């Protein structure tokens, strides 16, 4: 039997590659001879950086950027040096997850930095 596992991340809990591996492990317990292909997906939000960089065989680097309230925060940048491209996952650089509930104010927050 051929099985394709192609999930997006489960927001706030598991990344797409983690879900792929857990599903594969579970399937192999019940069907140890299955042919399984894992294709982690990203929808442009959380987890997309990891999916793309792993697909490209690229590398990660961490840079200091500014969060929505202009505070310094570390955020990963993914690089594909073969094609001279880079990806920044804005959710990790200036997303809502970086703010406490009482800091979520669109009049004060920005994605500038």
Image (cartoon, rainbow, N blue to C red):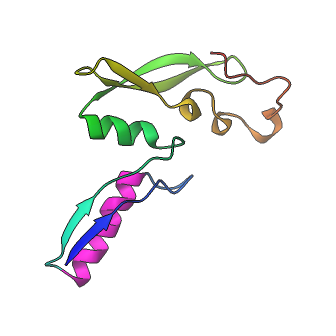
* Residue 31 left/right relative to 43: left
| Residue depicted at x 34% and y 60% | 20
Against 57, residue 47 (above or below) is below
Which stretch appears magenta?
16-31
* Residue 56 left/right relative to 88: left
User: Is 20 part of what is drawn in magenta?
Assistant: yes
Against 34, residue 98 (above or below) is above
| Residue depicted at x 27% and y 34% | 56
User: Is 12 part of what is drawn in magenta?
Assistant: no
| Extreme residue in the right direction | 107
| Residue depicted at x 56% and y 52% | 12
Q: Quadrant of residue 34?
A: bottom left
Question: In the rendering, at what x and y percent does residue 108 appear?
Answer: 82, 22
* Residue 48 left/right relative to 23: right
Question: In the rendering, at what x and y percent does residue 105 appear?
Answer: 83, 31
Quadrant (top left/top right/bottom left/bottom right) for the C terminus: top right
Question: In the rendering, at what x and y percent does residue 42 appear?
Answer: 45, 47
Quadrant (top left/top right/bottom left/bottom right) for the N terminus: bottom left
């Amino acid at each position: 039997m051929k099985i394709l596992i192609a999930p997006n991340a489960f927001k706030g809990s598991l990344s797409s590659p983690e879900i792929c591996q857990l599903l594969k492990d579970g399937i192999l317990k019940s069907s140890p001879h299955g042919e399984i292909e894992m294709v982690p997906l990203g929808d442009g939000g959380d987890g997309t950086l990891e999916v793309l960089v792993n697909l490209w065989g690229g590398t990660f680097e961490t840079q200091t950027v500014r969060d929505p309230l202009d505070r310094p925060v570390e955020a990963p940048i993914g690089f594909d040096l073969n094609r001279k491209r880079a990806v920044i996952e804005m959710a990790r650089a200036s997303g809502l997850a970086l703010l406490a509930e009482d800091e979520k104010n669109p009049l004060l927050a920005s994605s500038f930095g």
